[in-house]
Image: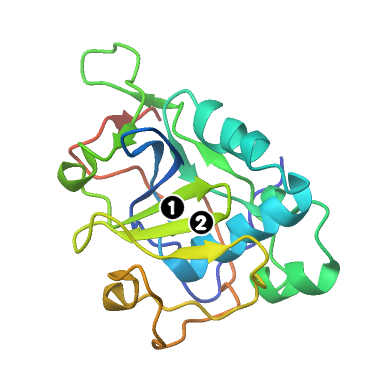
């Protein structure tokens, strides 16, 4: 598989987040290590729903939440398969990079890594900044350190929308205007580093 293009500006950020499916009591999700801000995740998720997954939220949840053994390191441009070229170009700046899981991690004693599940009961203690719940009518955005719930972005929203990364913009169920964020992703380079020291180390 081709490595991401050499980096000339920008870095993938270890803004930790999770992607979840709703449950009767709240949600059940999976950890994502990189690029967790709304300006990164919402365009990717909206485009994936509208094109790659054929507007089937259950198929999307099965792939992103159920189909991961440990967790995601980052989500890549493979989620944009089937989207119009003008949308892909607007979201990626012409760059390509693969989705990568955290299956390569090992624990200090060599035992298999534990699945990094995130629920409404554990999110506040898991050092995640953002949560994205795949609901039937859209994506609920939760700024985890600031709120236990958030507004829902409808599935028909244009992925090229400039979404705010300010937690205050997402701390109420009702959206209010907020500062816009970048719409084009900076160029990429080699795979990012492992999760924080409190998590299992990467096998090298």
- Mark 2 Cα within 10 Å, few/some/many (few <14, many 20+)? many
Q: Is residue 60 left or right of residue 169?
A: right
Q: How many marks?
A: 2
Q: Is residue 83 left or right of residue 162?
A: right
- Asked where in the image residue 107 lies, by quadrant, the reply is top left
Q: Percent position (x, y) of residue 80?
A: 72, 55
When the figure is inspected, residue 134 is found, relative to residue 204, above or below; the finding is below
Q: Percent position (x, y) of residue 146?
A: 19, 64
SS class, disc 2: strand
Instruction: Name the residue tied to disc 1.
Output: 132
Residue 11: tell me if it is visible. Answer: no
Between 93 and 127, which is closer to the camera in this rendering?
Answer: 127
When the figure is inspected, residue 33 is found, relative to residue 184, above or below; the finding is above
Q: How is the image coloured?
A: rainbow
- Mark 1 Cα within 10 Å, few/some/many (few <14, many 20+)? many
Q: Quadrant of the N terminus?
A: top right
SS class, disc 1: strand
Residue at x 63%, y 35% (from the top left corner):
58
Of pointers 2 and 1, the one earlier in the residue sequence: 1
Closer to the camera: disc 2 or disc 1?
2
Q: Quadrant of the C terminus?
A: top left
Instruction: Name the residue tied to disc 2.
Output: 139
Residue at x 43%, y 52% (from the top left corner):
132
Disc sitting over residue 84 in the figure = none
Q: Percent position (x, y) of residue 136?
A: 58, 47
Would you say the residues marked 2 and 1 are in contact, meaning their CB atoms lie under 8 Å apart? yes
- Asked where in the image residue 178 lies, by quadrant, the reply is bottom left
Residue at x 73%, y 44% (from the top left corner):
53
Residue 12: tell me if it is visible. Answer: yes
């Amino acid at each position: 598989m081709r490595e991401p293009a050499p980096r000339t500006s920008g870095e993938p950020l270890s803004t930790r987040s999770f992607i979840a499916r709703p449950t009767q009591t709240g949600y059940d999700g999976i950890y994502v290590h990189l690029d967790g801000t709304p300006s990164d995740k919402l365009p990717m998720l909206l485009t994936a729903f509208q094109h790659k997954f054929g507007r089937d939220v259950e198929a999307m949840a099965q792939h992103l939440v159920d189909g991961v053994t440990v967790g995601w390191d980052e989500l890549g441009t493979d989620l944009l398969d089937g989207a119009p070229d003008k949308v892909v170009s607007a979201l990626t700046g012409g760059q390509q990079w693969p989705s990568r899981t955290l299956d390569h991690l090992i624990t200090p004693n060599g035992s298999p890594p534990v699945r990094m599940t995130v629920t409404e009961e554990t999110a506040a203690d898991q050092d995640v900044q953002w949560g994205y719940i795949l609901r039937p009518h859209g994506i609920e955005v939760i700024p985890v350190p600031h709120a236990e719930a958030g507004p829902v972005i409808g599935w028909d929203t244009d992925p090229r929308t400039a979404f705010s990364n300010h937690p205050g913009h997402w701390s109420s169920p009702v959206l209010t205007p907020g500062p816009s964020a970048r719409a084009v992703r900076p160029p990429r380079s080699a795979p990012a580093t492992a999760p924080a020291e409190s998590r299992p180390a990467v096998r090298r």
